[in-house]
Image (spheres, helix red, strand yellow):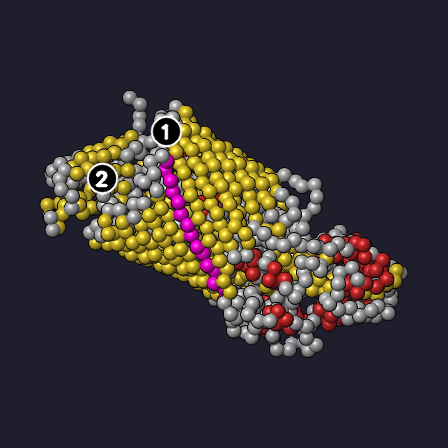
Amino acid sequence: MKKQWILSLVLFPFFAHAQLNGALIISGKIVGESHEALPSVAVSVKNTTKGTLTDSAGRFSLIVSQKLPFRLVITAIGFAPQELEIKNSSSQLTVQLTAQTYIANEVVVTASRTAEKLLRSPVAIEKLDLRALKETPAASFYDALGNVKGVQLTTSSLTFKVPNTRGFNIPNNFRFMQLVDGIDMQAATLGVPLGNAIGPTELDIQSIEITPGAASALYGMNAINGMANLITKNPFTSQGLSVYQRTGVNHVNGKDHPPSLLTETAIRYARAFGNRFAFKLNLDYLRGTDWISDNRNDQNPNSRITANPSYSSLNGAGNIAFDGWNKYGDDALAGSNTVSVTGLTIDGQTNRTLTVARTGYWEKDLVDPKVDNLKFDMALQYRFSEGAAITYSYRAGKMDGVFQRGNKIRLDNVVVQNHQLELKTRNITVKAYVSQENTGNSYNVKPLADNLDLYTGGSASQWGAKYRDALNAYAGSHGGALTSANLVAATQYAREQADLGRAEPGTPRFAAVKDSIIRINNWDIRSSSIPNAPVTGGAALVQKSNLYHIEAQWNLTPYLKFANVLTGADVRVYELIPDGNNFVDFSRPIADRNTPLPDGSFGARTYYRKAGGFIQLTKNLLEDRLKLNASLRADGNTAFPVQFTPRAAVVYTIAKKHNIRFTFQKGYRFPALFEALSYVNNGRVKRVGILPVINEGLGYRENSYTQSSVAIFNAAVKAAGNTDAAALANRNLLQAANLPDGRPEGIVSFEIGYKTVLFDDRLLLDIDAYTNVYDGFLGQVQVFVPTGEQIGSDAAVIAMIDRNRDATAAANGNAASKGQERYRVYTNAVNHYTSYGSSLGITYRFQQGYALSGNANYNGIRGNHTPDLFVTGFNTPAWTSNLSFGNRAVTRNIGFNIVWKWQDGFLWESPLVNGRVEAISTVDAQLTFRLPAFRSTVKLGGANILDTRHIQYAGGPTIGAMYYTAITWEGLAGK
């Protein structure tokens, strides 16, 4: 007889002799073929909402008020469901359930906002069920997202991970939406969800559904690359007290930091009172030492025109225009931290110019690696009847970490809160929630470094003058001239002299000045003629905002018999509280808007609104073999016209196993709050939003030159002596930016997919392919505005010369210049961008419970023949793959899982850092011990157990091994 997995349900005793007010107490234990305890098996009373899950020891207890006889429904992931009729109070029963591939009957709700078979979803969707989350060898259930087919998980910080699908990855991913029980988790002004900072705990997560691709047709803006929905446990079916303790160690090799302890403690308590009222409470605290960003690569080598290519001796360590990946205050490519030292004689050639970057500070000296995350959530649910309930839930999280936007942001005591109220009946759902954000003691790393340089090393012109004097002094004491042979030594000496008095990391003076700067909410870099003057420019990130959202969904199917019809609508309002540093006060006159508010004060509140609605029709034909799905959504925004997003899909089932899907959809993304309304004034490069109201009185859209043309222009001018005459002779190199008016970002997507289960449901095969066409891609471009001049004029050309920070700029008969303002502007790309790819997922379940699964993913982008306003940054490896092998029950109480992950190298492009990310290959592994007598499970595991040090994006942290022990106790208190 062919061996198969058997699930034995042993109920001993099936009923307790005691009864509670006429109700029966049902208790029992569920075990597997090897007599191992099976946790998370659902036991419910048919046609009611009454049910429970087994604990880690396989035990369950259920109070039933139904009259005999009634039926129990028993479902377990990996097994066919069974029904059991209960006729009397003395039954002793054994039930056998045949093993089944977990996906065969898996149900999802995120793809179509209604329950449906995963195999017949109209769009690509992946699901991590509770068993997969418990058995992952990743350091946390959230890290398991990185093993999902098509998902790229980027680690920005130990506490902050960013999922993405299908390309154009960035650490602040505006294109990927994250929900928890249908609630958007974004922090409004930051514009993205902060990983799992206020999401579910290890004890409360039930499943995760991921849609890799556009979901705008049903969910509106911010879902054009994909979305994830984290679904939590129901307090009616998952009751009792549970405790989770994880202890781990990272930095095991001691290269970036001494080995460090990581701890996480979580507590969950849930209880139901009859079949009407239930509540749950969750508390979680994590503390550890963050991964360190300390890459010493130079993204401005001497061979670039922005450095000093005429002098080959200044390569390598001698590069005076060094621009480090993880260094700030030396930003040569942005042109914000360089000085031009003019009028030099080198190798007998007169009137030479050197471009010199200021020394700056390494990120590891500016960012404290100690991080923590405290989160709490609660839910109260009351059922009016079997089909109607009202739920209030509250979530709050406080976190530290590192967040990358145009610059690195040190998140310190960021607090995000969420209140939600939901009324749900069989056909109608109304949901309202508010999210509140407060960035606490956070700060921007770049203005911190800039102001450290300014207040302890002098202004750029002062520093440049000291550097020039030191060069001439060195030349005078070494033969009276600068030559290629002594240039490296001379520039090293000049830097040492110019840096005299600079605050050095590790000193009390450095700590005191840093502490002063990060407390001031004003990033304006102000020159001072008095070194060590009181600090006035700061680096504090002070953002406060509220997000208000209400939505309703109505299932019209009971009233319209021709098809399944779902309709819904939502309204969202962002309430911005301007701090005068990141966002301007629009109630002030135009002339005053860009003047920082007094530190600690806030301006008049600004509102950014959107509203939308959708209708979806689903029709099954040909004896349910053919499924037709169509939806249409309309979204309006206060700043943009209404956008329509259609979706159409066909799913055809052949021989009840082979499911083929074709999907077409469009999507739009309105600019996020920061993309739309920001005005960040750090004095050297101002970052501004896309809306026309920001441009009023500034002129960066219609009166500016492109950064790339200014760099080429300055290279030519420096080679010709850095004079006014040289500038005017090369004026044709300057190109006007002519930035277009902003508009929403759009996508047109085509997908084809195939899913099947074969060989007695042991083999799952899942293939999909897509192509996306982006129109109006949103990004940032840097432009130069001549101060007080019109582009094209002689004065505007002279204003572009890079010598304006040099104390000798007006020497030798050159005209004085008003200089330039530099803006990094959110705008739309001119070109269309076509990306494409495919994913293959395979799972095979052997006898005796062994399982082998893997996926391979390809993503590519088609090149354009003409350059664009900015580099879009596909930032995605062409190939990624995952392979896992495991068995949850090698013996009665022991299981294991091993996951190998690989991705090839790729180019990373962003406003902060450009560079190559090398290929990554890592192994995660875990060994699980179940201790039924103690109602506990012990997991010994490690992420990246071979300690393969790697980065996931240019400028990001170096990630190594993490080894951990996780203990879970369940059922510690009565239900």
Task: Answer whether residue 699 is magenta in the image.
Answer: no
Q: Main secondary structure of the magenta part?
A: strand
Give the alpha-carbon distance from disc 2 to disc 1, as whole Å: 25 Å
Of pointers 2 and 1, the one earlier in the residue sequence: 2
The residue under label 1 is 624
Q: Position of residue 180 (x, y in %)?
A: 40, 51
Label count reads: 2
Residue extending furthest toward the top: 1
Nearer the observer, 846 or 638: 638
Give the left or right position of residue 649, taking residue 34 as reference.
right
Residue extending furthest toward the right: 348
Magenta span: 563-577
Amino acid at circle 2: Lys
Residue 385 visible in this rendered orientation of the protein: yes
Q: Is residue 320 above or below residue 769?
A: below
Q: Is disc 2 in contact with disc 1, using a CB cutoff of under 8 Å?
A: no
Residue 374 visible in this rendered orientation of the protein: no
SS under mark 1: loop
The residue lying at 60 percent from left, 48 percent from top is 776
Amino acid at circle 1: Asp
The residue under label 2 is 46
Q: Residues within 10 Å of mark 1 (few under 14, many from 20)?
A: few
Nearer the observer, 311 or 433: 433
Q: Residues within 10 Å of mark 2 (few under 14, many from 20)?
A: some
Q: Position of residue 910 (x, y in %)?
A: 62, 52
Q: Is residue 472 above or below residue 892?
A: below
Residue 702's image quarter?
bottom right
